[in-house]
């Protein structure tokens, strides 16, 4: 098959030694580099945009996890609102502090107050087979009858 | 035209930076990378496969793989162009192997009627077609090395990195490839219209 070279061009494919001049062919190969047609360009760009969308979706869970942190903080806020807001929270803190104080400080006279209360209520009287036990002797809750 | 203007604006942006922008959803980076890389990939595929339709498929697939790896791309580990050449070469090799299995007697694409009409085309076109046919007859490693060295104009160190061989091995492959090309093209003197002197 003749590739369409005119006879006058034959020698131009050869070097001085009569061998094939590859550099000519390489140069022709570079010149004849194919260009992507618009359809291929559009297909590649379409792939690119689809993958970009997939990447955005794949990265979305990270954003959701950040939003989860907000939701956790939101639970605390919801609790605060549920008990009545900051004033109620302050009251709760005061009660807790008072409880802590009562627990930490020795309640002097508590035993006497208890016996008076029990006597007034008729739950404690002389001769009764009742017996109060003081589990904390240091508090002087030492009433006892046999 | 805004399209060209955007690409001009990104002309100096390195491939890796564009890939990072791409992964962050920048559509202009997608266009810039496509315009920059697709012609190179397509040219490599056409030269390795000698067939345009298959080369189009390979080029699209190679770039699709680049898009997909973009979010995990580790900067500084490899050049985008090197990675892409290797992926394209592997895809072409797969195609050539399948082609060889399905049609072992048609390993080398013959000039078609289309090339017969090349009689009216430019001389360089005829040479390019002859070169393409001759390249298709080379062993794949020789063909790859010759194309990268003498068509793409890459240096031996970069080719060595792309082909995962030493620079000396690249030199050896290209030297043997060139000798084989010379022999093939010389053996087609009649086809090429050489005088028989």
Image (tube, coloured by chain):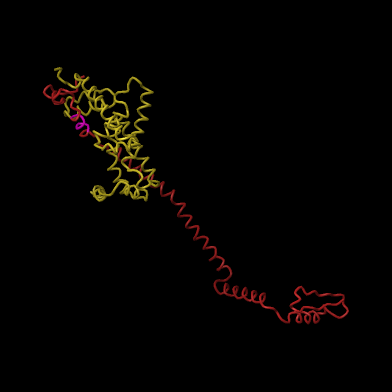
Chain colours: A red, B yellow
On the image, which quarter does residue A90 sit in? Answer: bottom right
Query: Residue B182 lies in magenta, yes or no?
Result: no
Residue at left offset 29%, top offset 34%: B44
Residue farthest left in this picture: A8
Nearer to the camera, B48 or B117: B48
Nearer to the camera, A42 or B172: B172
Residue B121 x %, y %: 17, 28
Residue farthest top in this picture: B196
Quarter of the image that includes the C terminus of chain B: top left
Residue farthest right in this picture: A127
Residue at left offset 32%, top offset 23%: B107
Q: Specify the segment rendered in magenta.
A: A24-29
- From this view, report whether residue A88 is shown above or below residue A72: below
Q: Please tell me whether the stretch drawn in magenta is mainly helix, strand or loop.
A: helix
On the image, which quarter does residue A26 sit in? Answer: top left
- From this view, report whether residue A68 is shown above or below residue A11: below
Query: Residue A27 lies in magenta, yes or no?
Result: yes
Is residue B57 visible to us here? no
- From this view, report whether residue B175 is shown above or below residue B34: above
Relative to B114, is B83 on the left or the right?
A: right
Is residue B128 visible to us here? yes
Residue A29 x %, y %: 22, 31
**Count of picture labels:** 0
On the image, which quarter does residue A32 sit in? Answer: top left
Residue B149 x %, y %: 25, 34
Relative to A129, is B56 on the left or the right?
A: left
Residue A49 x %, y %: 36, 45
């Amino acid at each position: 098959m003749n590739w369409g070279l005119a006879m006058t061009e034959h020698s131009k494919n050869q070097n001085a030694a009569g061998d094939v001049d590859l550099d000519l062919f390489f140069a022709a190969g570079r010149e004849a580099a194919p260009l992507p047609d618009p359809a291929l360009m559009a297909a590649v760009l379409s792939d690119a945009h689809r993958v970009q969308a997939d990447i955005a979706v794949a990265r979305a869970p990270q954003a959701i996890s950040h939003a989860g942190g907000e939701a956790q903080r939101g639970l605390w806020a919801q609790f605060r609102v549920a008990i009545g807001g900051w004033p109620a929270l302050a009251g709760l803190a005061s009660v807790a502090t008072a409880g802590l104080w009562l627990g930490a400080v020795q309640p002097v006279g508590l035993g006497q107050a208890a016996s008076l209360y029990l006597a007034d209520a008729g739950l404690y009287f002389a001769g009764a087979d009742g017996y109060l036990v003081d589990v904390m002797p240091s508090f002087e809750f030492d009433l006892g009858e046999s | 035209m805004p399209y060209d203007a955007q690409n001009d604006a990104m002309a100096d942006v390195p491939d890796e930076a564009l890939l990072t922008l791409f992964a962050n959803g920048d559509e202009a980076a997608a266009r810039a990378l496509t315009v920059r890389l697709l012609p190179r990939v397509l040219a490599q595929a056409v030269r390795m496969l000698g067939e345009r339709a298959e080369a189009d498929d390979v080029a699209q697939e190679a770039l699709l793989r680049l898009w997909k790896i973009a979010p995990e791309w580790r900067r500084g580990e490899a050049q985008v162009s090197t990675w892409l050449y290797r992926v394209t070469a592997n895809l072409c090799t797969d195609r050539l192997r399948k082609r060889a299995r399905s049609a072992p007697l048609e390993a080398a694409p013959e000039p078609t009627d289309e090339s017969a009409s090349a009689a009216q085309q430019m001389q360089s076109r005829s040479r390019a077609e002859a070169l393409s046919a001759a390249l298709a007859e080379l062993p794949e490693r020789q063909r790859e090395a010759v194309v990268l060295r003498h068509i793409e104009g890459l240096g031996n160190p970069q080719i060595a990195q792309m082909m995962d061989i030493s620079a000396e091995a690249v030199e050896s492959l290209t030297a043997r490839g060139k000798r084989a090309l010379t022999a093939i093209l010389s053996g087609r003197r009649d086809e090429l219209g050489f005088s028989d002197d």
